[in-house]
Structure formats: structure tokens, C-alpha cells
Amino acid sequence: MPFGHDMVHSLAAAVDLVNTSPATGGPDRLVDTQQLGDFVERHQMSGVGELGATDLSEVRAVREAFHKVFTAPDQATAVIRLNTLLSGTRITPRLTEHDGHPLHIHYFAPDASISEHLSADLGVALAHVLAEGEWERLRTCSAPDCGNVFVDESRNRSRVYCDSRTCGNRMHVAAYRARRRA
Ligand SMILES: [Zn+2]
Ligand SMILES: [Zn+2]
């Protein structure tokens, strides 16, 4: 993968954000500001102030916009959807070091709300994926009862499950049982 550390970090946050959505098949895991705070903490996002109800509803809207980028039927649609998302946020690149991370670039404006912060930083990371011609790496899990998204970072773009230990393992067991029944 040609992606650097901060790209990988932002892509992981985008995946985690989208997968909190009930649209991916599981329970909604972003229902209050406590869960939003946990998300911010989990991804060591800097410059985030007090979180309120407006932040929560805005982030929930951005979450669905990111989900639509991952589930776009083709690259052209993904580009349109991502550009729409990016057009709604101010982008201010600057170099920073925090929480022990090496020097990396932040894209959110200094006074950005959390939803703008996510749109800017995670949006730019996804823009790089598309610009590198790697749109196909934005995937949805192939397990029939799972709609989690993931970024396929495997060399030969062969990953089909969101998590090999859970969905991958579950599907292998199901296939094994089906073979035994046959
Ligand atoms: Zn950072
Ligand atoms: Zn899955």
C-alpha cells in the first residue's frame, strides 16, 4: 500500500465511523455524545472541544455521507459523493505533532466543529485513495449478514471480509459445514 501512517490512521477512523451506523447491519453505536466522545478518544483526534447535541446530529449526517462513498456503485459516483462531502467543509492544511504521533498534516480548520473536522481529515484521506486509482479498495464485507465497510490494504486486493477473525472465520466454518452436509 502506498499509504502513509496518517492516511492509514484517517482511513481507520472513517471505517470505524461508518461501521457505527445501523445502515451497516449492526446496532447504532453513535447515539449520544458519550459515544461520540469515545470515538474521538479512540482515534486520538486533537483540537476537539466540548461535544453537544448539534455535534452528534452533524456527525451522524456525515457518517451517512461517508457510508455512501464506500458503497458507491462505481468510481465516478464515489468521486461525486466525496466531492459533495468535501464541498461542505473548510480545509486548512497544517503540519502538526500530537499524542506522540510523528509530524503529519491536519486538514480541518482551527475552529472546526467535530463534523467539519471529520469531513476534512477523513475526506481528504479518502480523496487520496480515489486519486491513487485505488477506489476498489473501499469495500463492503461479503458475509451475507454483515454490511461493515473496510479498506482493503492487501497487496493483491483480495480481502472480502471486514474482519478475518469474525466474519472470515464464521464464513469458513459455514462453508466447512456445507461441505460436510453435501
Ligand atoms: Zn493528528
Ligand atoms: Zn463483516
Image: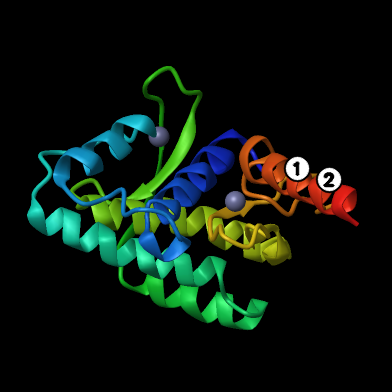
Q: Is residue 110 above or below residue 119?
A: above
Q: Position of residue 133 (x, y in %)?
A: 73, 65
Which residue is found at the position 8% from the left and 49% from the top?
52
Quadrant of the rendering where the C terminus is positioned: bottom right
Residue 8, quarter of picture: top right
Q: Is residue 48 visible?
A: no
Badge 2 element: helix
* Amino acid found under the numbered disc labelled 2: Tyr
Which residue is found at the position 26% from the left and 58% from the top?
59
Badge 1 element: helix
Q: Which mark is residue 44?
A: none
- 102 sits left or right of 76 in the view: left
- 182 sits left or right of 72 in the view: right
Q: Quadrant of ligand 1?
A: top left
Camera-side residue of 59 and 95: 59
Which residue is found at the position 63% from the left and 51% from the top?
151
Q: Which mark is residue 176?
A: 2
Q: Position of residue 106 (x, y in %)?
A: 40, 43
Query: Are the residues at dot 2 and dot 1 in contact (C-beta closer than 8 Å)?
Result: yes
- 163 sits left or right of 30 in the view: right
Real-space Cα separation, disc 2 to disc 1, in angstroms: 5 Å
Which residue is found at the position 51% from the left and 81% from the top?
80
Crowd tier of the residue under label 2, counting other residues whose Cα lies within 10 Å: few below 14, some 14–19, many 20 or above: few
Report the residue that reaches farthest toward the top. 100
Q: Is residue 59 visible?
A: yes
* Amino acid found under the numbered disc labelled 1: Val
Q: Position of residue 173 (x, y in %)?
A: 75, 42
The residue that disc 1 covers is 173
